[in-house]
Image (cartoon, helix red, strand yellow):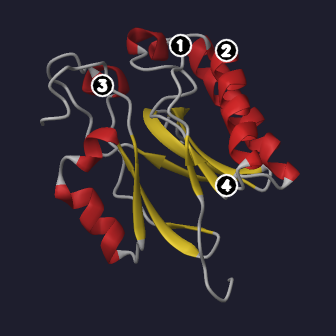
Amino acid sequence: MPKNPAISIALAQCNPTVGDIDYNVQLIRDERTAAAKQGAHVVVFPELAVTGYPPEDMVLRPAFQRRAMRAVQELAGDTKDGGPAMLVGGIWVGDDKQLYNAIFYLADGDIQTIQSKVDLPNYGVFDEARVFHTNGTLPKTITINGIRVGVIICEDTWTPRVARALMQDGAEILISSNASPYEITKAAV
């Protein structure tokens, strides 16, 4: 651990295209390259950046699931170059064969952590409870450049239990990966 830990975080506020995994992977790579030039330790991408948001019923197709998971593994391989780590949103089929909305911590050429969204929204334009079926478990912190980081996925920000669990696990900073359809009144909310 560094004597005086510090972390430089790049926020990739990019616009992935729903369903175009190849385009989204290139977009993620381009954003990571830009963040590397700025000296970032980690780049944070939107929720479901690999698939685009909201992917709706596409995520139910096994071929789409396989391609999305393969894309995450490819992106993990990119991190063996010593450049910035990534927090990338995507889908994952767990060992339990359930489909999850997840965020991946990619570093040192591998998937270091897979964290699944705890609170799946099912109101208004959000239909995640129907397509993902399974809520994630309360997350643990990850260490990035000596800092204990808690990662929250979108809707998990709106309820205190996820942040509370991360704080109890020693989080020094919370990062929320979000992606929502445009809403004119969101800033006021």
The correct choice, above or below, for 84 with respect to 130 in the image is below
Mark 1 Cα-neighbour bin, 10 Å: few <14, some 14–19, many ≥20: some
What label sits on residue 40 in the rendered view? Answer: 4
Between 145 and 72, the one nearer to me in the picture: 145
The quarter in which the C terminus is drawn is top left
Of the two numbered discs 4 and 3 on the same chain, state the one appearing first in sequence.
4
- Of circles 2 and 3, which is in front? 2
What label sits on residue 126 in the rendered view? Answer: none
Which residue sits at x=48%, y=29%? 48
What label sits on residue 128 in the rendered view? Answer: 3
What label sits on residue 17 in the rendered view? Answer: 1
Q: Are marks 3 and 1 in contact (CB under 8 Å)?
A: no
Mark 4 Cα-neighbour bin, 10 Å: few <14, some 14–19, many ≥20: many
Give x and y (percent) for residue 2. 69, 83
The correct choice, above or below, for 120 with respect to 111 in the image is above
Q: In terms of secondary structure, where does tag 2 sit?
A: helix
Of the two numbered discs 1 and 4 on the same chain, state the one appearing first in sequence.
1
| Horizontal relation, residue 87 to residue 158: left or right | right
Mark 3 Cα-neighbour bin, 10 Å: few <14, some 14–19, many ≥20: many
Q: Amino acid at mark 3?
A: Glu
Give x and y (percent) for residue 39. 72, 56
Which residue sits at x=60%, y=79%? 5
Give x and y (percent) for residue 146. 61, 76
The quarter in which the N terminus is drawn is bottom right
